Image (cartoon, helix red, strand yellow):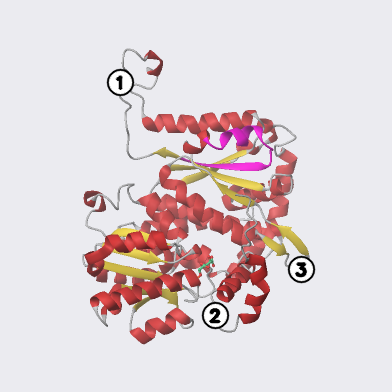
């Protein structure tokens, strides 16, 4: 059975010294401090307040996803997700992690499944390029619009564009066959539209925020359609669930992870760098960024006091960013906690080619396994950071498959819940996102937002005082 592990020895004072490391007594203190946070998260789960925790066991959602995936199997060459934030980042992360790199380009690697595109922006140049390409292939394309509310401007504008295109090109009833809506079970703009037009629908579960929704139909449909083992994914999440409820930090990886991150935040290291050493894991770092930032970046605590807390999540990619960020990471301010993601067995191997006679200095590479090189570079970078007293965690995947991906996602979701309790904030809201949304409505001349428009126009006016 494949598994992940959390390695935390390289944050200890023994490795990075007393000034930057965690001593035995500090670990013991942290273990006491995190206990009530774990208990509170367990209580919230029992009371049904954090339903994301039980998604790995929900057969109804799983069957509904499998049903829709089976219905469309073999009928479409392109599957397009329209969503943003929590309605897109998990889909992208799963696809990058669990489908081959050339999936969209090489039919053989796709094994009869449709190409996957995820549009999580409103960039007219990007979408135009796609629409120019899709041309006659529209008939073989299905769109999964994912929006709990249906009112998110980005997703709504893309949906309206596609709806119009389908109607113009394929006729009045085309939308019914070419759109699947994943939305609230009962309420909201998208539910209203979908019911009215007779679209196939899947449910965004009640009480599950976008960033905690990967194991719901939000994340599962595109994965299932692309041939990802969604049973394995949920199995992995359920396995991790067994490890993250216990109140002993030393046997609970989510508690350990949360406690270490919280400890360093309070000790002058407010930046948390996720540093995968595998291209396939790069979008997990993106997914993590949203999970961490929207959940933990808050101005008030649960008692209403102003606190302005939140670790800043940063993504990096090994080995690529060794040639971009590591100079700063080693010699810049010691204000970061690093979390490496490492894969032991890549499942594929490349043996490096032979060396020309004129370049004997490359001889050490000839015949070397590429997996040995990437993992050597990870260890070398970690060694260099530790040398400069920079604390490092590692999440080690013995291999990357649906089960370990499920374990990883669940580990980080529960880590976030426990960290939220340690920070004493509401992990599950995102009030700060609202003002920007409303200002967009105002600038787009939406009715009812005229007063706000007046207020913000002077601030946003470009006045010609540019330096260049
Ligand atoms: O995590 C979240 O809750 C957000 O990122 C939402 O997923 C995002 O704003 C999209 O919202 P909606 O699904 O309503 O379109």
Query: Is residue 282 among the parts visible in the rendering?
Result: yes
Residue under numbered circle 1: 354
Nearer the viewer's eye, disc 1 or disc 3? Answer: 1
Occupied quadrant, residue 439: bottom right
Which residue is the extreme one toward the right? 305
Residue 393 lies, with reference to residue 67, above or below; the image says above
Q: Earlier in the sequence, mark 3 or mark 2?
A: 3
Q: Which residues are magenta?
A: 324-342
Disc ID at residue 51: none
Query: Circles 1 and 3: CB distance less than 8 Å?
Result: no
Query: Is residue 242 among the parts visible in the rendering?
Result: no
C-alpha separation, residue under disc 3 versus residue under disc 2: 35 Å
- Label 1 secondary element: loop
Q: Residue at x 74, y 43 (%)?
A: 26
Q: Is residue 131 left or right of residue 189?
A: left
The image shows residue 314 at horizontal and vertical percentages of: 58, 48
Which residue is the extreme one toward the bottom? 196
Camera-side residue: 149 or 439? 439
Camera-side residue: 456 or 72? 456
- Label 2 secondary element: loop
Residue under numbered circle 3: 303
- Label 3 secondary element: loop
Residue under numbered circle 2: 446
């Amino acid at each position: 059975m494949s598994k992940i592990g959390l390695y935390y020895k390289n944050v200890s004072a023994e490795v990075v010294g007393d000034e930057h490391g965690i001593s035995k007594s500090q670990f013991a203190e942290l273990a006491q401090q995190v206990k009530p946070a774990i208990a509170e998260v367990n209580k919230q789960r029992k009371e049904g307040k954090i339903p994301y925790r039980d998604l790995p066991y929900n057969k109804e959602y799983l069957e509904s996803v499998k049903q829709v995936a089976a219905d469309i199997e073999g009928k479409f060459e392109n599957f397009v997700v329209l969503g943003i934030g929590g309605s897109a980042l998990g889909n992208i992360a799963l696809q990058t992690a669990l489908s081959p790199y050339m999936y969209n380009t090489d039919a053989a690697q796709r094994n009869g499944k449709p190409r996957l595109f995820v549009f999580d922006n409103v960039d007219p140049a990007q979408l135009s390029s796609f629409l120019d390409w899709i041309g006659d292939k529209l008939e073989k394309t299905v769109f999964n619009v994912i929006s709990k509310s249906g009112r998110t401007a980005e997703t709504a504008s893309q949906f309206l564009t596609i709806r119009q295109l389908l109607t113009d090109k394929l006729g009045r009833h085309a939308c019914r066959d070419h759109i699947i809506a994943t939305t609230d079970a009962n309420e909201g703009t998208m539910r209203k539209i979908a019911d009215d037009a007779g679209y196939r629908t899947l449910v965004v579960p009640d009480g599950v925020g976008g960033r905690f929704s990967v194991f719901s139909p939000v994340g599962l449909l595109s994965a299932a359609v692309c041939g990802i083992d969604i049973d394995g994914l949920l199995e992995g999440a359920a396995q991790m669930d067994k490890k993250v409820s216990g109140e002993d930090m030393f046997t609970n990886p989510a508690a350990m992870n949360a406690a270490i991150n919280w400890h360093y935040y309070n000790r002058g290291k407010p930046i948390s760098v996720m540093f995968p050493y595998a291209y396939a894991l790069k979008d997990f770092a993106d997914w993590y960024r949203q999970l961490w930032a929207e959940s933990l970046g808050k101005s008030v605590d649960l008692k209403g006091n102003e606190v302005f807390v939140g670790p800043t999540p940063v993504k990096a990619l090994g080995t690529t960013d060794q040639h971009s960020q590591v100079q700063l990471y080693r010699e810049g301010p010691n204000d970061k906690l690093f979390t490496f993601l490492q894969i032991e067995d890549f499942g594929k191997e490349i043996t490096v080619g032979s060396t020309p006679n004129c370049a004997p200095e490359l001889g050490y590479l000839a015949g070397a396994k590429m997996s040995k090189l990437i993992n050597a570079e990870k260890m070398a970078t970690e060694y260099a950071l530790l040398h400069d007293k920079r604390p490092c965690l590692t999440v080690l995947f013995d291999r990357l498959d649906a089960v370990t991906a499920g374990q990883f996602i669940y580990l980080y979701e529960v880590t976030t819940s426990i960290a939220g309790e340690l920070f004493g904030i509401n992990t599950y809201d995102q009030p700060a996102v609202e003002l920007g949304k409303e200002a967009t409505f105002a600038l787009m001349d939406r009715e009812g937002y005229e007063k706000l428009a007046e207020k913000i126009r002077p601030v946003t006016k470009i006045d010609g005082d540019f330096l260049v």
